[in-house]
Amino acid sequence: MSTATPAPPAPATTRTTSSAPISFVGAGPGDPGLMTLHAVGALASADVVVVDTTTPREAITAHARQDVEVVVVDPVSAPTTAARAKLVTAPAKAGRRVVRLFPGDGTSRPDLGEEMAAARRGSLGYEVVPGVSPAVAVPLYAGVPVATAKACDVHVLDVDLDSSGVDALASAPGTLVLSGGHEALVTAAKALVASGRPEGREVTVTSRGTTTAQRTMTATLGTLSDVLSESDESLPDPLVAVVGPGTTQRGRLSWFETRPLFGWRVLVPRTQAQSSGIVAALAGHGAAADVVPTIAVEPPRTPHQMDKAVRGLVTGRYEWVGFTSVNAVEAVRAKFTDYGLDARAFSGLKVAAVGGVTADALREWGIEPDLVPTGEQSAAGLLAEWPPYDEVLDPIDRVFLPRADIATESLVEGLVSAGWQVDDVTAYRTVRAAPPPAPVRDAIKAGAFDAVVFTSSSTVRNLVGIAGKPHPATVVAVIGPATRAAAEELGLRVDVVAPEPSATAVVDALAAHGASLREAAEAEGTPLQKPSDRRGTVRRRSR
């Protein structure tokens, strides 16, 4: 039987927050997943986040509340130290929790000490949460160890803040890690050559390190100026450059930029609530996902059926409750809230979930499902493992099935054939979502996306209906045969079909396809091109 067990409290170390009104936080090298747990906790509780123009916004999107106020420190409107510090202290004095978010580890920024002093003068409590240093993380993500057996000494310098420090380090043994903009790095390279470093000494330069937009170029001290001028747009500031023996190991140690989908932009036509697993799986293979909802979920036209079913659930009308989607879980949960009920009302009931994602939604509610298919995670897979009604073992013969208005009848018919009485209740309606913004529609049709992942036939039809057909160069990955048929019916060429109908399987299959493209390019000795790079050479698909 299902039990309504409250989730255990999170360990105290998971999200540490402070009673101090101000947190000075390092955002890390770029990937918000590399932020410390303490930094994540501070951002989650912030009312105001104060950032520089160079601070990556991904950290705020990933960890802060949607209603958080973001204040940008503009050198024009806040040219003095006092003006910048006031942006931090003023909201704190008004009783708001403030996070001052610095790029990188934060500790090398001169503003940090000045703003800490301002908080002290204002009798405001504060804490400092250093971040992961880009000088360490970015080279490693580029496959360049900064410390080697030949060079254990590592010297780090922000040439934007202190260009004169290059002369002092020119003759220092070991590895130099220089961060800064294009012009400052070119000036630093010339200074190193002038101080006696060989012009042919290899340099790696990385932009947007630790993110899926990371790009690394190799040059020498003598050619760095030409390389950076040719790649000005593809290597935006700030940059991290490494001068040392570890640069020669990049070819065999590169691990991040060689992921099968690295740098791919993948379209996910799904609601935000249903996309977290796919987005995380794509990120694990090096891709960035753009979620475009193709359906919107609305309440049923009349609430009578759901009201009656929920009352029946409480009064013991059902033996089983079967959930075939996360949306169904959310719809029942919302109805419970209306009635002042919680998960304890499921005590004594048997609960089924169509798959792992739906099961996780139930667990978040405090309900452990009794039945989750071990094989195919679909209505057919659920029906295959659902036990038939047994008049001896089952005191009640009725099932509550909250579903979408467009759900197929196969599950209901199968349960009836197995001896069950089924209350098939419309818990929510699915309607076509509004078209995405014009830039997204243009990107879909122009081939700016490298791949699109379809997880149902309706997502294919709805995406084409609200945004148009994906470009012929875009790789089309589908979750199963029915979705493939829908795509081909609309004239799309299907490149990838998941071996089993699950979000993880379709992403893994897409990654395998990406790996095969890389292997083919290596075998032919040609540069690897993403599908979006080939959009000018791919002929249009025909119906």
Image (spheres, grey):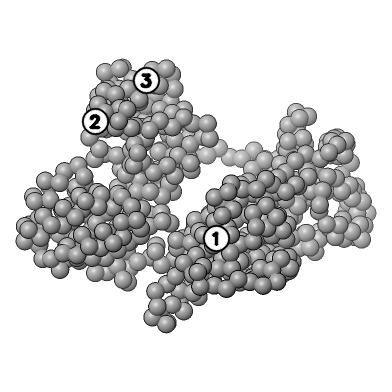
Residue 116 visible in the snapshot: no
- Neighbourhood count class around disc 1 (C-alpha, 10 Å): few under 14, some 14–19, many 20 upward: some
Q: Is residue 66 visible?
A: yes
Q: Dividing the picture into quarters, in which one does residue 149 lie?
A: bottom left
Q: CA distance from mark 2 to mark 1?
A: 48 Å
Q: Residues within 10 Å of mark 3 (few under 14, many from 20)?
A: some
Q: Secondary structure at mark 3?
A: helix
Please identify the quadrant where the C terminus is shown. Answer: bottom right
Q: Is residue 148 left or right of residue 190?
A: right
| Mark 1 lies on residue | 446
Image marks 2 and 1: residues in contact by CB distance under 8 Å: no
* Earlier-in-chain disc, 2 versus 3: 3
Q: Which residue is mark 2?
A: 113
Farthest bottom residue? 524
Dot 3 amino acid type: Ala
Kind of residue at disc 1? Ala
Residue 123's spot in the image, x, y percent?
31, 17
Which residue is denoted by mark 3 in the rendering?
90
Judged from the image, the secondary structure of the residue bearing numbered disc 1 is helix
- Residue 172: x percent and y percent? 9, 56
